[in-house]
Image (tube, rainbow, N blue to C red):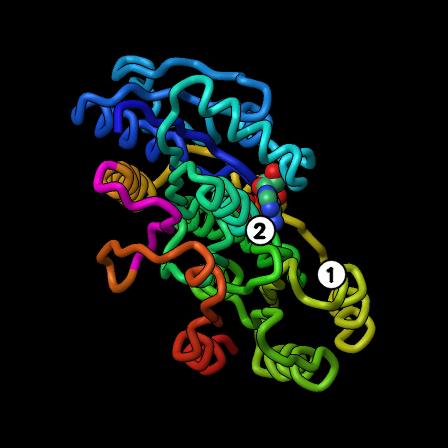
Amino acid sequence: IRKIGILTSGGDAPGMNAAVRAAVRTAIGFDMEVIGIKRGYNGLIHGDFIALDAGAVGDMIQRGGTFLYTARCMEFMEEAGQKKAFEMAKKHGIEGIVVIGGDGSFRGAEKLSAMGLPTVGIPGTIDNDIVCTEYTIGYDTACNIGMEAIDRLRDTAQSHEKCSLIEVMGRKAGHLALEVGIAAGASAILVPEKEYDIKNEICRNITEGQKKGRTHHIIIMAEGCRDKVQDVAEIIEKETGISTRVTVLGHIQRGGAPTVRDRVVATRMGYFAVELLRAGRGNRLVAMKGNALTDYNINEGLMMKKSIDETLYTICQTVAR
Ligand code: ATP
């Protein structure tokens, strides 16, 4: 394989740049040429390319976001768009593509592989919601940003003796909310994977805490929960009488310099992905299992099941009071 392409797609995540950097430098080390494809599948369809040499990815490892830009591309959802993308890659002599993104991006990568263009996916999303891997690039950074933000909110909740209800990102999954909540010492954590009862459980705990002398409360809610955070705040205020402030962390959690863990995992995964392409192994997803890297067939990888860490949830139920 002489020439590969690399793109970032779906939501951006801190560490994507580190993965691109590692993939580029690994490929160059194997005497391959590397083409950076801008704005995900959009750039592939329209030939929006830049040649990447070792220098082009310098001063990138510490940057959040993705310097290749990312996009959602509706045209690529259709067969016609996929064909265009395939032809464009062929025209430019691209013989394999590294796709850094989430589930949707990998479904797209699978389509290209089926057409005869080998692809390897690297999991990059702050949500850690890709089933076949225990870790996705960006997750640790997002956890740390969330924790720091909640530490700050705690100061003001404590000073004003209020309840602070904080919505944490994570799409439909509760991984981010659970870990951030534990790290920030939340008194309750609501995740979509688990049933919860606001009146009889959350509010009662708050009231009991008040009786024991607790003056402020930190409650974490995953964005994927079925209830709206404002509605939950209203119930808490009505039932407990404690003034409740809502903060939605939102995209704050997605920005910023990647942590050590994200830079190291991104570097390992970037290297691993290029090795797979070099070995002629397309239609693969890079995944982490017990701190080692492995790979799965894209379809099989996406069909696996993953829930939140049950042990962690039990521990959290015990210590979060
Ligand atoms: P994140 O979860 O971080 O948002 P994602 O990769 O799941 O990332 P999506 O918006 O679902 O984000 O997908 C990104 C892009 O991948 C889409 O805009 C589209 O171009 C392509 N894509 C998604 N699903 C498919 C599919 N079933 N077939 C072909 N291409 C797809």
Q: Quadrant of ligand 1?
A: top right
Q: Residue at x 57, y 51 (%)?
A: 153
Q: Nearer the viewer, residue 120 or 173?
A: 120
The verdict on residue 283 being magenta is: yes
For label 2, count other residues whose C-alpha is less than 10 Å away and answer few (under 14), some (14-19) or many (20+). some
Q: Does residue 215 appear to the left or right of 184 in the view shown?
A: right
Q: Residue at x 68, y 33 (%)?
A: 75
Q: Is residue 167 above or below residue 125?
A: below
Q: Nearer the viewer, residue 120 or 288?
A: 120
The image shows residue 10 at horizontal and vertical percentages of 56, 40
**Residue at which label 1 appears:** 229
| Circle number at residue 208 | none
Question: Is residue 145 at least partly visible in the picture?
Answer: no
Name which of mark 2 and mark 1 comes first in the sequence: 2
The verdict on residue 81 being magenta is: no
Q: Is residue 52 above or below residue 236?
A: above
Highlighted range, magenta: 278-288
Question: Is residue 40 at least partly visible in the picture?
Answer: yes
Q: Is residue 154 above or below residue 262?
A: below
Q: Nearer the viewer, residue 59 or 91?
A: 91
Q: Nearer the viewer, residue 209 or 177?
A: 177
The image shows residue 16 at horizontal and vertical percentages of 41, 35
Q: Residue at x 46, y 33 (%)?
A: 256
Mark 1 is on which residue type? Val
The image shows residue 41 at horizontal and vertical percentages of 56, 31
Q: Is residue 32 above or below residue 302?
A: above
Mark 2 is on which residue type? Leu
Quadrant hosting residue 196:
bottom right
Quadrant of image for the N terminus: top left
The kind of secondary structure element at disc 1 is: helix
**Residue at which label 2 appears:** 153
Q: Residue at x 52, y 66 (%)?
A: 186
